[in-house]
Image: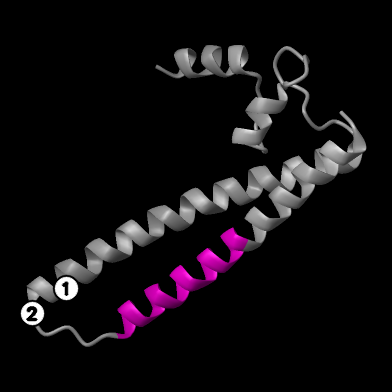
Amino acid sequence: MQASELKYFKEILEGRKAQIIKNIVGVNDELDQLNSLELNDEGDYASVNNNSMVESAIVHQQEQELREINVTLGKISNGDYGICEMCEDHISFQRLKVKPHAIYCIDCREIVEKSRK
């Protein structure tokens, strides 16, 4: 992969990383506010509890993506970026444009998804 392409993906990944961190901080602040509310009835409690569960699930998903991005940024630094972890072929540029932190090429991703079912 060319240096300009690596720079392009690194910038995308760093931008996404900053956005995720901002999102996580915002959601955590919102959860803190929800937890500090004085709830008057069971309906309020159920609503806040439901919102908390949804927000927690979103944070969990974004934390996972953040871990994947950090691993990918390490691969860029090490010169291992864009190599499928299963077959060790190059991941296509188009696939990386869609998911810059992809660890599998399209074929191997399908194999992994089928094996999870």
Q: Is residue 22 visible?
A: yes
Residue in the picture at 74% in, 42% down: 71
Q: Main secondary structure of the magenta part?
A: helix
**On screen, residue 60 above or below 72:** below
Q: Quadrant of the N terminus?
A: top right
Residue that appears at 63% across and 54% down: 16
Q: Looking at the picture, which amino acid does disc 1 mark?
A: Tyr
Q: Is residue 31 left or right of residue 48?
A: right
Determine contact: label 1, label 2, CB under 8 Å.
yes
* Few, some or many residues within 10 Å of mark 1 (<14, 14–19, 20+): some
Where residue 35 appears, as percent x and y from the top left, is: 32, 78
Q: Quadrant of residue 36?
A: bottom left
Mark 2 burial class by Cα count in 10 Å: few <14, some 14-19, many 20+: few
Q: Would residue 9 be found to the left or right of residue 52 on screen? A: right
Please provide percent x and percent y for residue 55.
37, 61
The residue depicted at 89 percent of the width and 43 percent of the height is 77
Residue 53: percent from left, percent from top: 31, 59
Q: Which residue is mark 2?
A: 41
Amino acid type of the residue tagged 2 in the rendering: Asp
Q: Quadrant of residue 42?
A: bottom left
Residue numbers of the magenta segment: 19-36
- Left/right placement of residue 2 relative to residue 68 reads right
Q: Quadrant of the C terminus?
A: top left
At mark 2, the secondary structure is loop
The one of 34 and 105 positioned closer to us in this rendering: 105
Q: State the mark number for residue 45.
A: 1
Labelled disc at residue 66? none
* Distance CA(mark 1)–CA(mark 2): 6 Å
